[in-house]
Amino acid sequence: MKTHFALTLALGLCLATARPALAADAAGTADQAALKATIDTCATCHGAHGQSVSPTFPNLAGQGALYIETQLKAFKDQSRGDPDAQAYMWGMASQLSDEKISALAAYFSAQTPAPGHAGNPKLVAQGRKLFDEGVPARGIPPCASCHGANAEGQAVFPRLAGQHAPYLFKQLLVIQNVLRTAPVMHGVIKDLTRDQMQAVVAYLESI
């Protein structure tokens, strides 16, 4: 009788211990499923694994986690107010928790970056010179000083290598016209001509 009672008690304790673990596993599985669903939604515009096939939407694959997280929070609190942000990302980001934002940033930053696409050699060469050297005579610093020698990004400065040229060109115009708040970039590109912008983005798309 005592043995039967001891076994019953031990079994009860095991079940009591197991229930929280099972609940935690179930919660973790639910979280993973929810994250996958959100990633699949992102892929509608940004492509599988963050490699976009549309020049309207930027590649996210290999983008810096800190940059992605910063931008998603800016979309969510509507502090990034350029037209495309309002049209596409304000609504998409409005329901994201900080935890989901961090998870998305970690996922996309870990993906293989999109490959570059060759462009007009002359334009690419001009863009590379601007990116590496800036325009000293006009006080325009090199893009590489913030975005890295290979445009791979660093800290809050985004990866630009392999990004769609039309997307980058549009963002440069938006920033230059102060439709998107970017204090560092405002000062850097305020005197860039459209031809210079076209050259820089052609180079960036090529690498």
Image (cartoon, grey):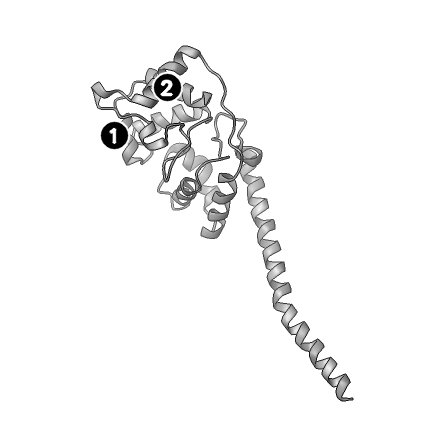
Secondary structure beneath dot 2 equals helix
* Mark linked to residue 147: none
Is the residue 72 above or below the residue 26 in the image? above
Residue plotted at (74% across, 85% down): 5
Residue 16 at x, y percent in the picture? 65, 73
Which of 13 and 93 lies nearest the eye of the viewer?
A: 13
Secondary structure beneath dot 1 equals helix
Is the residue 154 above or below the residue 191 in the image? below
Given the current orientation, which residue lies at the most extreme top position?
122
Is the residue 74 above or below the residue 184 in the image? below
Residue plotted at (38% across, 36% down): 154
Residue 197 at x, y percent in the picture? 35, 20
- Label 1 near label 2: C-beta < 8 Å? no
Distance Cα–Cα, label 2 vs label 1: 20 Å
Q: Name the residue under label 1.
A: 187
Relative to 93, 1 lies left or right: right
Residue plotted at (30% across, 21% down): 133
Kindly report which numbered mark, 2 or 1, lies closer to the viewer in this rendering: 2
Residue 42 at x, y percent in the picture? 53, 38
Q: How crowded is mark 1: few (under 14 residues within 10 Å), some or many (20 or more)?
A: some
Query: Mark 2 is on which residue type?
Result: Arg
Which of 66 and 179 lies nearest the eye of the viewer?
A: 66
- Quarter assignment of residue 72: top left
Given the current orientation, which residue lies at the most extreme bottom position?
1
Relative to 17, 138 lies left or right: left
- Quarter assignment of residue 78: top left
* Mark linked to residue 128: 2
Query: Mark 1 is on which residue type?
Result: Gly
Relative to 43, 94 lies left or right: left
